[in-house]
Amino acid sequence: MKRAALLGPLLASLLLCACVTKPPKDYSLFQRAHPATILVLPPINESPDVKATPAVWSSMTRPLAEAGYYVVPVTLADETFKQNGVTTSYDAQQIAADKLRQFFGADAALYVTVREYGSSYRVVISEAAVQVIAKLVDLRDGALLWEGTARASSAEQQQQSQGGVIGLLVQALVTQIVGSTTDAAYNYAGIANARLIGGPGGVLYGPRSPRAGQPPAQPR
Amino acid sequence: MAFVLGLAGCAQPGAPLYMWETFPRQQYAYLLREGISPDQQIQEIETHAEKARAANARLPPGLRAHLGMLYLSVGNPGRAMELWNAEKVAFPEATPYMDQLLKRLGQPKADPAKEPAA
């Protein structure tokens, strides 16, 4: 009983310490806007890999939905855009906010750009990496509610787990094989998106979450 | 029974809100349009839905809508309508968009099989 009383504040202070590494984001506009439905527009791809847009687009629903938002179904949105003659991500991201709001019934839209997607093969280390940047815009008044960026890379584990040059060469071979046969960057798109939305500095929890309105203190 | 369902509906903080299974992958495959078979996807998602029912877990946003679109693409607009309405029941936020799609599906003379999703 006594021990618990002592441990409580200690644990609390440890938890608090973990959160104060960065200056806190300003969530006041976001909090007031209180969006419930988010439309993720097709991401603009700045990488040479054409799979970047489908990979990043299809893996954005999960972190947003787990954060408590309704996400407009991306495969249906894709059909709707195509049938209305909108065939590129760039064109989709130029559509007027009130049109998007009317048709999809969304409160806010997520504008995503893929900065980096795919594998780079080098002698010692092969890396599959994905980097995304995103802006959440209120479709009712055009206000910027939130923005963020995140990156995920296979090199994160490689650098930790491999020792010596031989180990690195083997690892490079293994990751090249894995990368070319199983679409390795796809998995890192999921990780980058999860960090972007649910990591420190991510979006506020939405109305369908038990933590609605709170900022994401810990990774989900 | 209603009480039990009510309890199950309260998500534990930290626990996932939805049962995802392979749904993100399926959406990826659809967007890539690389040799996806609608029948195979339908079967996989129906199995997923069955599993969620048995576990009393929630299906993610968009799953019913996506499944409806797949049924439409194999010439079953009746099932598509059911599923788009089910998306509205599960997520009232989906209503404006689903109503747009349902309205187009209900248009006379249009061949629904040739008009997936919209």
Image (cartoon, coloured by chain):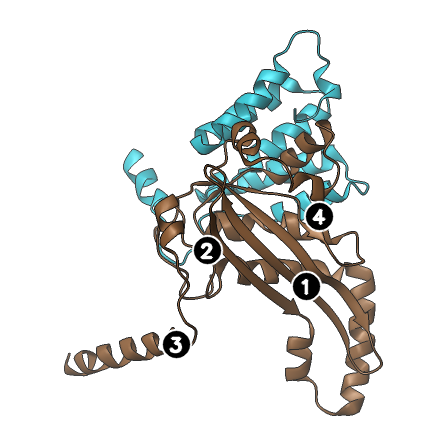
Chain colours: A brown, B cyan
Q: Earlier in the sequence, mark 1 or mark 4?
A: 4
Q: Which residue is mark 2?
A: A203
**Residue type, mark 2 in image:** Val
**Residue A121 can be seen in this image:** yes
Q: Quadrant of residue B84?
A: top right
Q: Which corner quadrant holds the C terminus of chain B? A: top right
In the rendered structure, the answer to whether residue A50 lies left or right of residue B85 reads right
Q: Check if mark 3 and mark 4 are on a common chain.
A: yes
Mark 1, residues whose alpha carbon is within 10 Å: few (<14), some, or many (≥20)?
A: many
Q: Earlier in the sequence, mark 3 or mark 4?
A: 3
Mark 1 lies on a secondary structure that is strand
**Badge 2: chain ID:** A
Q: Earlier in the sequence, mark 1 or mark 3?
A: 3
Q: Are marks 1 and 4 in contact (CB under 8 Å)?
A: no
Mark 4 lies on a secondary structure that is helix
In the rendered structure, the answer to whether residue A5 lies left or right of residue B43 reads left
Q: Nearer the viewer, residue A67 or B45?
A: A67
Mark 3 lies on a secondary structure that is loop
**Residue B1 can be seen in this image:** no
**Badge 4: chain ID:** A
The CA distance from mark 1 to mark 2 is 19 Å
The CA distance from mark 1 to mark 4 is 13 Å
Q: Nearer the viewer, residue B8 or A129?
A: A129
Q: Nearer the viewer, residue A95 or A129?
A: A95
The CA distance from mark 2 to mark 3 is 18 Å
Q: Which residue is mark 3?
A: A18
User: Is A112 situated above or below A161?
Assistant: above
